[in-house]
Amino acid sequence: MRTLATGSATSTASADGFFARWIDHDTWSEWSPDTEWARVEGPVATGARGVLKPKGGPRTRFTVSACTPGREYTDTARFPGARLVFQHTAEAVGGETVLRVLVTVDGRLAPLWAAILGGGFRDSVQADLDRLVALVEAAESSKPAPVRSQADAQPASSHTTGSSS
């Protein structure tokens, strides 16, 4: 297996917020501008199949190879003689979310595919992750605060009664 690219970031946004974006294929182009579009057939789960269209490239079929809510989204594309894997993980650590992206290729033609694809992924993976962090943090910071009732807003206190003349 050859590593083509890695990315990492730490965010104040929730792991669930990132997972929601990973499985929302309609929004991939918002944080990955090299992606024209991506679609998945049916519900997003391990084993689901999809197609994506990179800008300037051919449609590429992929399979969701890992899908663990709030933790991991991985997809795998097969090329002649190789397999390309994109692994996205999120881990809650000390009130923050640690994100990692790992792009690998393996198979007998992995060296050829690494030479063809490697430079593009090295240039884009961290930038894509940084855009994703900005989008998810902005979305979470704009969520309205939970509505509290009047009773919840008032501190508990003892009531005293007195007489007035």
Image (cartoon, rainbow, N blue to C red):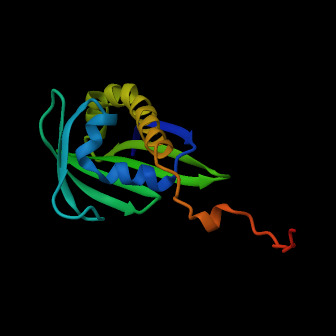
**Depth order, front residue of 132/110:** 132
The quarter of the displayed image where residue 121 is located = top left
Please, which residue is most extreme toward the left here? Answer: 58
Residue 143, horizontal then vertical, whole percent:
46, 48
Residue 141, horizontal then vertical, whole percent:
50, 42
Q: Quadrant of the C terminus?
A: bottom right
Which residue is located at x 46 percent, y 38 percent?
Answer: 138
Residue 37, horizontal then vertical, whole percent:
18, 40
**Depth order, front residue of 26/123:** 26
Which residue is located at x 87 percent, y 73 percent?
Answer: 163
**Tally of numbered discs:** 0
Residue 145 appears left or right of 125:
right
**Depth order, front residue of 10/95:** 95
- Residue 63 vertical placement versus 36 (above, below): below
The quarter of the displayed image where residue 42 is located = bottom left
Residue 107, horizontal then vertical, whole percent:
29, 47
Q: Is residue 82 visible?
A: no
Which residue is located at x 19 percent, y 58 percent?
Answer: 49
Q: Is residue 162 visible?
A: yes
Residue 76 appears left or right of 12:
left
Residue 135 appears left or right of 40:
right
Which residue is located at x 51 percent, y 45 percent?
Answer: 99
